[in-house]
Amino acid sequence: MSDDRPDIPEPMKREVRQRCGFGCVICGSSIYQYDHMVEWSQLQEHTVENLTLLCGTHHDEKTKGLLPLATVQQANASPINVRNGVTEPYGLHYGPKAPLLTVHLGDNKFMAGVSVFPFFVDGDPLIFFQSTDDGVGLYVTLRDDYNRTVLRIWNNELIHRADLWDVRFEGTTLTVRDAPGDLRLVIRFAPPADVYIERAKFQYNGVQIDVKPTKVTVGGQTMSGSAMINVGTTVGWVIGDRHPEIESAFSWQDISRVPVKFGDGPPAVGYRQGVHVTDGSE
């Protein structure tokens, strides 16, 4: 790459991400590079029409002449994620067991040796670590104003809708935006044992949990600077309807809720209900 090549403008990158469904147009991988289909050396300019997304493998194959330009252009015209409506699953590397699992939620920390559940809403956890004999699994569920799941991490497997306004996965940080200046999620992955929720808007059944770097607001109540740790399982806050098997020191049943929107729209990303809370003694 020549030193005088200008950077691709950020608005242009976003338009390319949106058109390509936030992944490699051939395989759908969420880890990708911006590729000039007709080489930069020939055009000497960045254009939305000539840019696409390719994973490292397909980018290298194209550079080496193993992947024809016509094949890339065909995939660019109909990206796999756009056709499927969701991204191809990406596997996060939280496999091996770790001595201490930690969910950093704003300036709150939830730690445990086996499983970590920062909060439940109406009996369902929206983010947690859970250990099994197979290793450590990270689970995250992100819903929109219509209570539809738009992003899911299930046992380290990341998938999200391909029609979101913007999703950017750079380095270890995944950022989801609903609109300019409207952040839905900023999450930083730190395998093998930590995850950082730096900003987020979690919604479920009208309950909204706003996460910012210095505080977490739950139905108008602020939680800041707390830390919980257990040898087995840590359960942080229980919000809304209780589950009989879930015990927590902090519980809000009479919580402020906002009306859930109704209307047509893309279907939710699949979500498996039901989580077995264990302290590792079984």
Image (cartoon, rainbow, N blue to C red):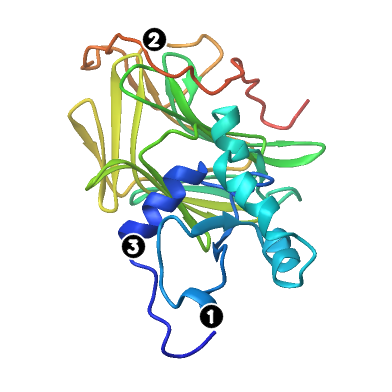
Q: Which of the two discs, 1 and 2, sits closer to the camera?
A: 1
Tags 2 and 3 touching, CB below 8 Å: no
Quick one: SS at disc 3? helix
Say few, some or many: other residues with alpha carbon within 10 Å of mark 3 (under 14 / 14 to 19 / 20 or more).
Answer: few
Give coordinates of residue 114: x percent, y percent.
66, 39
Instruction: Give the residue at x 31% y 13%.
Output: 253
x 73%, y 61%: residue: 57
Q: Amino acid at mark 1?
A: Ser
- Amino acid on which the number 3 mark rests in the picture: Glu
> Is 276 left, or right, of 204 in this rendering?
right
Circle 2: element type = loop
Res 41 label: 1
Classed neighbour count for the residue bearing mark 1: other residues with Cα under 10 Å, few (<14), some (14–19), many (≥20): few
Say which residue appears at 41% left-offset and 73% top-offset: 45
Residue 235 horizontal/vertical position (percent): 50, 31
Counting every numbered tag in the picture gives 3
Front-most of residues 88 and 128: 88
Amino acid type of the residue tagged 2 in the rendering: Asp
**Mark 1 to mark 3 CA distance (whole Å):** 21 Å
* Cα distance in 3D space between marks 1 and 2: 61 Å
- Image quadrant where one finds the C terminus: top right
Q: x, y percentage for residue 19?
A: 45, 44
Q: Which residue is mark 3?
A: 10
